[in-house]
């Protein structure tokens, strides 16, 4: 239903791929809605549009597309908690959590998360909008967000946006402007990031605090990608994968009956213990491990992973994720399993090989997400444009150098006694595994002095654990509990 349209600036920017497609750089479209959450009617305002990014000289260099949900029928007003939400990639739009997790609408999917036609959205009775307002932010080149050319038609340099530290810097500045425009400085503030968004929000925690003077109550890491572990390889990174292998093998009934007949959560602690105390040192020994120890480790890995001792020994105990996705069901059905959610099944051209032809889960998700977000923005949020919505956008050669985000979060917590951290992971996520997320949590504060301010929640699904309805309910309830627990309740910020 259509309400009003306001144009803050008349300036428009020209997109780099066309001189004819134009979109307003500072625009807001507002609609009013109602949703039933946890048995209560929640009235809310949905505001979608653009807010500029300025350089240090005050020149507009980009404009970010966002959607802001604000509850309108409670008495807290602008003192309500507010959550700034990011997805990952880098180069991914903020549609995944927007229309499948925390927002007031969710995809039309089945109970396990598989797409259902007709594609579209429906009310989300589990949204956290009852307890917090939410802003979904799309970094440059994702969604409708784009760079802006100067008066001479020259685009700003990629290095201002496409790197760990550049991304953090401009997004923190944008959030400061947004907080001021919406008069939210009195609100308890949270940031949530999924996948690469985990790296992003770890870095934002200190950047917001030290350069934007914005202090947070909570940081939420959803299936976080920690680039101190991810894609690094070696004994540590390899060993952290084993508990995920156990979970995926358990789901597909590939474990020995002594394990298969137990509940998953009964099994995982012993596998985690083996991975830390036995597997890391074994792989670290490389070619100098004794044959007796190598055979014993391979036997135990086979027991916990569903793979044969032979293929584990052929991999010298260091089993890559991609090989596991191809190998687990090779001799049973010849099918592959999904990367981001290993409950999903794929069919390759041939059964031979060391990695799957494609990501079975991602193609399934794109079935439902792409049409749904385009429909939702145009028909329910009333934003009209011919510009393509980039589910995944080009971010050039992303600069991963000088990644201090893990320590940035530690510093932010040390300086801010209010700040707490929640990690949420799916056991069947083979991209950013749940045990690697636990390890990241352990390493943020090596002193252990702040460990009571960390919490971890695991779910029986994958990277986007909220696609499974049972976990959608549980994960949102965990967010509610985290918000309630991290509100100061009149306590002063001191140790």
Image: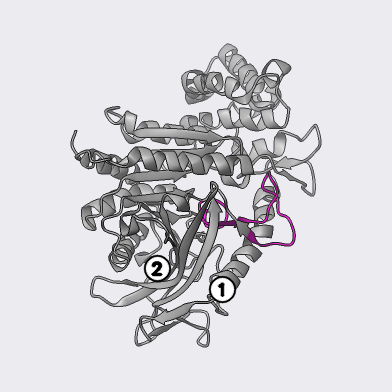
Query: Which residue is at a point 49% across and 65% down the rendered structure image?
Result: 142
Prevalent SS, magenta region: loop
Q: Which residue is mark 2?
A: 158
Camera-nearest label, 2 or 1: 1
**The quadrant where residue 63 appears:** bottom left
Q: Which residue is mark 1?
A: 1
Q: Secondary structure at mark 1?
A: loop
2 or 1: tag closer to the N-terminus: 1
Q: Quadrant of the C terminus?
A: top left
Q: Where does residue 201 sit, x and y in percent of width and height?
A: 38, 50
The Cα atoms of the two marked residues, 2 and 1, are separated by 38 Å
Q: Secondary structure at mark 2?
A: helix
Query: Which residue is at a point 49% across and 40% down the rendered structure image?
Result: 477
Q: Quadrant of the N terminus?
A: bottom right
Query: Could you tell whether 207 is left or right of 269 in the image?
Result: left
Q: Is residue 58 visible?
A: yes
Whether residue 51 is situated above or below residue 107 in the rendered picture: below
Whether residue 234 is situated above or below residue 143 in the rendered picture: above
Query: Could you tell whether 315 is left or right of 60 in the image?
Result: right
Whether residue 444 is situated above or below residue 213 in the rendered picture: above
Q: Where does residue 168 sit, x and y in percent of width and height?
A: 34, 57
Region in magenta: 97-121
Q: Which mark is residue 242?
A: none
**In terms of depth relative to the viewer, which is nearer, 292 or 50?**
50
**In terms of depth relative to the viewer, which is nearer, 289 or 454?**
454
């Amino acid at each position: 239903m259509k309400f009003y349209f306001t144009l803050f600036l008349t300036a428009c920017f020209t997109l780099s791929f066309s001189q004819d497609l134009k979109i307003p750089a500072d625009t807001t479209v507002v609609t009013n809605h109602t949703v039933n959450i946890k048995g209560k009617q929640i009235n809310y305002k949905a505001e979608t549009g653009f807010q500029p990014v300025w350089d240090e000289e005050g020149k507009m260099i980009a404009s970010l597309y966002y959607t802001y949900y604000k509850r309108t029928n409670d008495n807290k007003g602008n003192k309500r908690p507010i959550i700034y939400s990011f997805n990952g990639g880098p180069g991914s739009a903020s549609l995944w959590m927007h229309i499948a997790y925390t927002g007031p609408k969710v995809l039309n999917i089945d109970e396990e998360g598989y797409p259902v036609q007709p594609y579209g959205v429906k009310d989300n009775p589990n949204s956290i909008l009852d307890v917090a307002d939410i802003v979904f932010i799309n970094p440059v080149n994702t969604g409708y967000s784009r760079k802006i050319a100067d008066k001479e038609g020259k685009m700003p340099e990629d290095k201002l946006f496409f790197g760990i530290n550049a991304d953090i810097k401009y997004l923190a500045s944008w959030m400061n402007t947004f907080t001021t425009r919406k008069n939210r400085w009195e609100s308890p503030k949270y940031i949530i990031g999924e996948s690469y968004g985990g790296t992003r929000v770890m870095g934002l925690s200190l950047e917001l605090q030290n350069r934007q003077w914005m202090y947070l109550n909570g940081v939420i890491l959803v299936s976080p990608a920690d680039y101190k572990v991810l894609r690094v390889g070696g004994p540590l990174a390899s060993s952290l994968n084993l508990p995920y292998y156990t979970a995926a093998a358990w789901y597909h009934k590939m474990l020995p009956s002594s394990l298969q007949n137990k509940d998953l959560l009964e099994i995982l602690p012993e596998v985690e213990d083996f991975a830390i105390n036995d597997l890391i040192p074994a792989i670290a020994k490389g070619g100098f491990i004794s044959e007796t120890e190598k055979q014993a480790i391979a036997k135990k890995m086979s027991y916990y992973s569903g793979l044969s001792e032979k293929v584990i020994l052929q991999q010298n105990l260091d089993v890559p994720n991609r090989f596991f996705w191809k190998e687990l069901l090779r001799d049973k059905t010849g099918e592959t399993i999904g990367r981001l959610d290993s409950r999903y099944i794929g069919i390759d051209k041939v059964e031979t090989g060391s990695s799957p032809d494609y990501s079975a889960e991602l193609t399934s998700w794109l079935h439902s997400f792409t049409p749904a977000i385009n429909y939702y923005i145009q028909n329910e949020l009333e934003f009209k444009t011919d510009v393509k919505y980039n589910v995944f956008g080009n971010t050039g050669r992303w600069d991963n150098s000088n990644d201090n985000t893990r320590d940035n979060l530690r510093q932010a917590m040390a300086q801010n006694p209010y700040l707490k951290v929640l990690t949420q992971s799916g056991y069947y996520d083979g991209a950013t595994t749940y045990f690697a997320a636990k390890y990241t949590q352990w390493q943020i504060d090596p002193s252990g002095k702040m460990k009571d301010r960390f919490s971890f929640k695991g779910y029986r699904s994958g990277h986007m654990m909220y696609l499974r309805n049972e976990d959608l309910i549980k994960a949102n309830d965990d967010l509610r509990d985290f918000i309630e627990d991290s509100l100061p309740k009149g306590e002063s910020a001191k140790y």
